[in-house]
Structure formats: structure tokens, C-alpha cells
Image: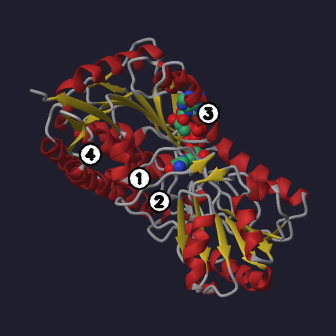
Amino acid sequence: MNATTTTTPVRRGNEAELVAKEELPPLQHFIDGAFTTRTDAAGTDIVNPSSGTVICCVLEGTAADVDLAVAAARQAQTDWGATTPAERSDLLLNIASRIEENADILARLESLNTGKPLATSRDDVSGSVDTFRFMAGAGRALTSLAAGDYATDHTSVILREPAGVVGVITPWNYPLLMAAWKIAPILAAGNALVLKPSEQTPLTTLKLAEIIADLLPAGVLNIVTGLGPVVGERLASNPDIDLVALTGSVGSGKAVAATAGNTVKRVHLELGGKAPVVVFPDANLSAVAESLRTAAFYNSGQECGAACRVLVHESVADQLTQLIVEQVSTFIIGDPTAGDDVEIGPLVSEAHYHRVAGYLERAQKEGITAAIGGAPLEGPGFFIAPTVLTNVPAGAEASQNEIFGPVVTIETFSDEDEAIKRSNETPYGLAASVWTRDSARSIDLPRKLHFGTVWVNSHLVLANEVPWGGFKGSGYGRDLSIYALEDFSRTKHVMINHAR
Ligand code: NAD
């Protein structure tokens, strides 16, 4: 590629300063209210992505571990589901306060395990607190159609009940936050759950269990660590689980849905994305570039809603590219010990680093230009330079596949119809944004884009009150908001004959 970078990640501290050994959580499963190990268990090394060194080793659970956890959840759910919304709300509020009291260690542990800048981990912790607080309130407001007479002499009542026992599988990009997005609505709706964190980043999920263990009735929340095709597979196949929810890649989503089909289980999928950022000539281009600094590169671009695919009108493409490159050229890259000013950390693992580097190499072979970045950075750790790829032709691999790294592609369009068609020409349907000052276009265009969230003159702004989830290859089901509570519950019609 034409552009290279000489940026070296900033390193000021060391791993021991981030988290002391005694601050690590118990490295065991959390089943029926207690941490437990089976003696024949194998282990997975947990790696610090900033250095490549091993932090600790976590149990590889088995189908038998999952079955134990499911039995505990099933036992606990009956009493938990019979509590009032107010009682469940109290528990969620207490969990929120406990997370807040432990915010510092949770943030440091998240940064150690994922390489995220500390500022990003702190956002994840405060976001998790807000999710528990929102669901504590929203769970009390959950209703269904109250009652009505629809057949002669019969009165219908619609009850909303817990779904039952929920299996949850979470990814590595926001380990604590994605756990919170599931645990809070699932408990608020009166369910019990068994959660499997990513085998790469289980530490904050285990820490969460440790710090809230005394608040929870035994068995309502169970954690089993281990591999997707073993522990995750059993969560999808165990007949005593009523619903399985996965946040992860499309491939894992397909596998879970196929397995869940054998027991006719409900499935809730939050999968990948490739968000188009559609920029019209009347847009405030400086605002687009400033927004992309966060929306495209937050969490090193390892973000399912990342603003990673710019589609800009050809008349302003050069100007916008220049503005984005200016933003990217001032990033502070480093490991979490390098201080609060770090904005970009390493990628989560060596395998993912090679995957993203492979996309950049293939883009280069296809003749795509890097306006800035375009290559890995010097180790140790799994750093990739923040990259802007220009002259990306329609249909190029880099603009179609989820790269999931600090990489933005820029394509051009010549009219609105082409912009809509090209935006929708992706298997994903999670998120998109439209940038324009034309009021009619700002209302009309979101309706024509097939994505679960469409921002206008903004990107990647989330709130617990509004739903998050995709269409098409990005899955189905909604996280956050009252819609998550609906997804994790079921309706029952009771019809009473009162003829005399
Ligand atoms: P991944 O699919 O590799 O892993 C996610 C989880 O699924 C892990 O816990 C893994 O162990 C498990 N898993 C893997 N194979 C499985 C199988 N056969 N059966 C059951 N479970 C299995 O995803 P990842 O690499 O950890 O996360 C990145 C992906 O997650 C990206 O595609 C990203 O877009 C997506 N994501 C989506 C959202 C969203 O809200 N839509 C949020 C965060 C991440």
C-alpha cells in the first residue's frame, strides 16, 4: 500500500500494575451459588493482548457441567419466577450498586484481558450499571393486553410469564457489557440463566459472579466457562433450556440456531455487522469525520455497529477522506497501562490480529490504497495501525466482510438510488447512518435502509431505553429496552367461561 505508519504503541507500565494476582476472580465455574471445579477439567490459557503473555488458565467446561448448571437453574427458576417485579427490581438495583462499588477492578480486569484502553473499560462498566438500573425499572412496567371479552360469555386475560431457563453465549469484544445486556433483562423477566463467556475473555464475567454471589438466590445465575462447540453447543441442545441467546459471529449464530431447532427452542441472535455510513454532499463533513473518530475506531473497531464502511458522494469524497485522515493521524495508541489518554488498544488475540492483517494484505493485492495506516504495528502485543482504505471498488472483500478491526473503507456513489442499493447490498443488517442536512431525505432514507438501527447525522450512540438488534445476517431478537424484556418472556392466554 502507498501509506505506511511509523507509529509505535505507547507503553508506560506493566501488567502487574494493572491487576494484582489476588484480584483475579476464582477460575472456576459458578453453579448453584458456588464456585466449583471438576477434577478432570482441562484449561484454556487467558492471554494479555497487549503483551502476548499468559495471565492465567480457565476451566474448559463439559456438557456435564452445563447439565449441572441447567438443573440448578431449573430448580431456582420456579421460586425466582414467582417473585414480584418489585422484588426482582430490588435485586437488580443492588447488583448495579455492587458493580459501581467494584468499578475500578472490573475496568482494570477488562483492560487486562481485552487490551482495551481503561477509558473504554470504564464506559463498559458504567454502561453495565445503567443496564441493570434500567431493567430494574422497566421490569416493573412490563405489561400485556390486560383483559377483554372476545367470545360470548368468555373473558380473556393475557399473562406475561418468564420464558424459563435461558442459555446465554457472549463474545469477547465487550465481555462485561454483553453479559449485563443479557443478565439484567433475563433476571428482570423472572428467568434463571446459564451463561458461557467467550473462552478468550471470561475474567470480568467470573468477577461479576464473585462480587454479586451473596446477593443472588442460588441457581438463578450460573456461569460455565469453556469452548463454543462444547459448552455453547450444549446450551443450544440441552432440552431443559427454553431459549438460547447468542451474541457473536454469524457462523456461531447459525450453528446455535441449527442445534436449537432439534429441541424447538426459542433463539435470540445478535450477530455481526458492517455498518454503512452514507454521506451526501450537503452533510457537515467535519462532523462526519469527528464522529467517525469514535464511531469507527472505538474499541479498536472491534464493534458490531462500527462505522466501518463509508459510502460518500463522489463530489465530496476527497474532502471527506482528508478530514478522516486528519482525525486518524492524531490517535494515541497504546496498552492500557500507558495512561488515560490512550484511545486505541491492541486487537483481542493473535489469531484475530492475523485475520485483520490478512484483510489488509489482500486489499493491497487488489490495488486498494491506504490513505493512512494499512499494516500491523511492531510488537509485543497485537496492534494494527488505524487504517483508512480509499478507492475501494464496489463489491470488494474489504467493504463487504466484517473486518472487526481499526479499518475504515471509503467508496463513492453518484446518486441517491445507488447509495441505497449499495448500502443494502450486504448480508448484514445491524446498523447504518445517513449524513445529510436535507430534512425530507433524513426522514425518508432510514425507511429504505434494511438495518435494525439507522442514525441520522450521528453513529454509534446507544441508550438502554431503545432496542438494539439486527435484520438479515445480523440476527433477530432485541437487546436493551422493553423489547428485550418481551423477548425473554412469553405470553399466555387464559380464557374464563362465565356463562350462568
Ligand atoms: P464468536 O462467534 O467467535 O464467539 C461468540 C461466542 O460464541 C463465544 O462465547 C464462543 O465460544 C461461542 N461459540 C462459538 N462457536 C459456537 C458454537 N458452535 N456453538 C455455540 N457457541 C459457539 O464471536 P466473537 O469473535 O467472540 O465476537 C465477535 C462477533 O460478535 C462479531 O461478529 C461481532 O459483530 C459480534 N457481536 C455482535 C453484537 C451485536 O449486538 N449484534 C455485539 C457484540 C459482538
Between tags 2 and 3, which lies in front?
3
Any mark on residue 144, and which?
A: 4
Dots 4, 3 in contact, CB < 8 A: no
Label 4 or label 1, whichever comes before in sequence order: 1
Secondary structure at numbered mark 2:
helix
Where 345 falls versus 472 (above or below)? below
Label 2 or label 1, whichever comes before in sequence order: 1
Between tags 4 and 1, which lies in front?
4
Residue drawn at x 72%, y 46% as measured from the top left:
355
Residue 242's spot in the image, x, y percent?
A: 39, 26
Residue drawn at x 76%, y 60% as measured from the top left:
375
Three-letter code, disc 1? Leu
- For disc 2, the marked residue is 337
- For disc 3, the marked residue is 254
In front: 467, or 150? 150
- Distance in Å between CA atoms under marks 4 and 1: 47 Å
Dots 2, 1 in contact, CB < 8 A: yes
Three-letter code, disc 2? Thr
Label 4 or label 2, whichever comes before in sequence order: 4
- Distance in Å between CA atoms under marks 4 and 2: 49 Å
Label 1 or label 3, whichever comes before in sequence order: 1
Between tags 4 and 3, which lies in front?
4
Label 2 or label 3, whichever comes before in sequence order: 3
Where 153 falls versus 462 (above or below)? above
Three-letter code, disc 4? Ser
